[in-house]
């Protein structure tokens, strides 16, 4: 039977970039706004307090937010100025009673024809503000939106760039060998599929450093400098700090796992795995691993189906084994886990680039003291009448 595998194409990458760009831009803007708020707040601590007269004042209400709008007049160095900036954060919100409480205070002063305190930038007297509170809850909200949207956008764009490079290489191979889709990928063609664990550590570490830097700056500003934090602000700050500690813990765990198991390689006995035949080989881990409960080895075939905005992954077939003995029990420099699965004749072949992608995945896991072992390999499984020369002979598998 002939394989009808969809050839790789980079046509969808442009749409993916257009979709992810707004997320990346909004995330970067919110992170920049968060950092600028900290810088702006620090500048305002050195501005000079000056009496000001309110010319207009109102509490602008949106669907779920409130924001104080005001215009005021003040005199600095013998010259009169007018400003309409009320607070450090120039956006409406519904976090606590900050907007309502300060509106009432300013309203009382305006009705009594009393002056209010304005803080004026000595270097640029036309720049002033009435409320220079840091408001850590607003800082945390901006940072949270920035991280979520930035992670989706920037992380997605990096992923698209890597995938696009891989697709170009696979597309070139597909032109040369259209009837042998297992040769379109370098690792499939060589029969050695290697996966690493460093990417997760670096991504988590960068996220933890940025998050905890913002949390630390907010904590210092609120607990050391401002010292007028409300219970709500303290609660938000506590959650922000706990999230940062959670990220640090996750970064530590991924680091220990990376150091213990930097990579793993599935060396195939024959390329590809055959429908109606078998998938066989050995998983090589460059460290001695003793698993008291054995190694859980699973082979599964999945298909991803997209319907509108929903995406689901269906398991079309799977088989599991527990491997209690490795091939190299006396070799303390590595661990070799034998793999051999019989594949029935009525399953779908690998088709990772189809509209409904079909993927075969080999998963190897073990519960250990400390970081657990957990690796997943995407393996080639196809129908074919003539097997290729095995890059790693089956006799050699038994000798590892």
Image (tube, helix red, strand yellow):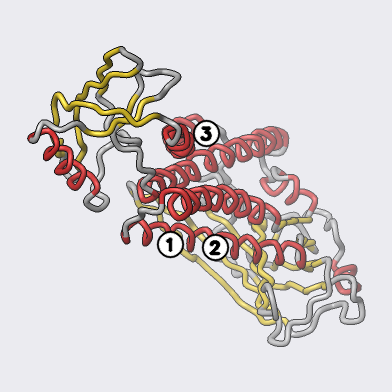
Q: Label 3, on which residue?
A: 13
Q: Secondary structure at mark 3?
A: helix
Q: Residue at x 35, y 38 (%)?
A: 132
Q: Nearer the viewer, mark 3 or mark 1?
A: 1
| Residue 103 vertical placement versus 43 (above, below) | below
Which residue position holds label 2? Answer: 245
Q: Which mark is residue 10?
A: none
Specify few, some or many for label 2: CA neighbours under 10 Å numbering under 14, 14-19, or 20 or more: some
Q: Earlier in the sequence, mark 1 or mark 2?
A: 1
Judge from the rendering whether residue 78 lies leftward or rightward of residue 99; answer left or right.
Answer: right
> Is residue 400 or residue 189 the one in the foreground?
400
- Which element type, helix, strand or loop, lies under badge 1? helix
> Is 91 on the left or on the right of 382, as rendered?
left
The quarter of the rendered structure image containing the C terminus is bottom right
Q: Nearer the viewer, residue 374 or 135?
A: 135
* Callout in the foreground (2, 3): 2
Which residue lies under the disc numbered 1?
238
Which quadrant would residue 394 be assigned to in this image? bottom right
> Horizontal placement of 104 versus 245: left or right?
left
Is residue 44 in view from this perspective? yes
Quadrant of the rendered image containing residue 46: top left
Between marks 3 and 1, how big is the CA–CA gap?
Answer: 40 Å
Cβ–Cβ below 8 Å for labels 3 and 1?
A: no
Q: Position of residue 307 (x, y in %)?
A: 35, 50
Where's residue 342, x and y in %? 66, 72
What residue lies at 92% left-to-right and 81% top-to-bottom?
330
């Amino acid at each position: 039977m002939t394989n009808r595998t969809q050839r790789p194409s980079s046509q969808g990458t442009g749409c993916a970039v257009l979709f992810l760009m707004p997320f990346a831009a909004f995330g970067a803007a919110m992170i920049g706004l968060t950092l600028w708020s900290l810088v702006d707040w620090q500048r305002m601590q050195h501005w000079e307090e000056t009496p000001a007269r309110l010319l207009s004042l109102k509490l602008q209400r949106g669907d779920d937010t409130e924001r104080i709008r005001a215009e005021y007049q003040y005199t600095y160095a013998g010259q009169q100025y007018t400003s309409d900036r009320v607070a450090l954060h120039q956006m409406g919100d519904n976090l606590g009673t900050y907007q309502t409480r300060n509106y009432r205070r300013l309203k009382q002063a305006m009705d009594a024809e009393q002056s209010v305190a304005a803080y004026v930038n000595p270097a640029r007297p036309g720049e002033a503000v009435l409320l220079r509170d840091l408001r850590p809850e607003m800082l945390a909200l901006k940072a949270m939106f920035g991280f979520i949207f930035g992670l989706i956008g920037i992380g997605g764009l990096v992923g698209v760039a890597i995938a696009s490079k891989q697709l170009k290489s696979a597309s070139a191979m597909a032109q040369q060998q259209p009837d042998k889709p297992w040769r379109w990928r370098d690792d499939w063609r060589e029969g050695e599929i290697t996966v690493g664990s460093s990417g997760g550590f670096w991504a988590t570490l960068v996220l933890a450093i940025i998050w905890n830097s913002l949390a630390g700056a907010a904590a210092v500003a609120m607990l050391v400098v401002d010292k007028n934090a409300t219970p709500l602000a303290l609660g938000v700050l506590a959650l922000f700090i706990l999230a940062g500690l959670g990220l640090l813990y996750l970064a530590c765990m991924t680091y220990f796992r990376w150091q213990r198991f930097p990579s793993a390689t599935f060396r195939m006995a024959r390329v590809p795995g055959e429908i109606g035949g078998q998938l066989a080989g050995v998983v090589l881990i460059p460290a001695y691993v003793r698993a008291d409960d054995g190694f859980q080895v699973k082979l599964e075939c999945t298909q991803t189906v997209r319907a509108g905005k929903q995406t689901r992954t269906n398991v079309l077939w799977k088989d599991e084994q527990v491997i209690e003995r490795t091939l190299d029990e006396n070799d303390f420099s590595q661990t070799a886990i034998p793999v051999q699965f019989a594949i029935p004749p009525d399953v779908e072949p690998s088709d990772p680039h189809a509209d409904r992608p079909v993927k075969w995945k080999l998963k190897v896991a073990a519960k250990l003291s400390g970081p657990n072992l957990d690796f997943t390999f995407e393996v080639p499984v196809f129908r074919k009448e003539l097997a290729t020369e095995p890059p790693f002979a089956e006799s050699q598998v038994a000798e590892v």
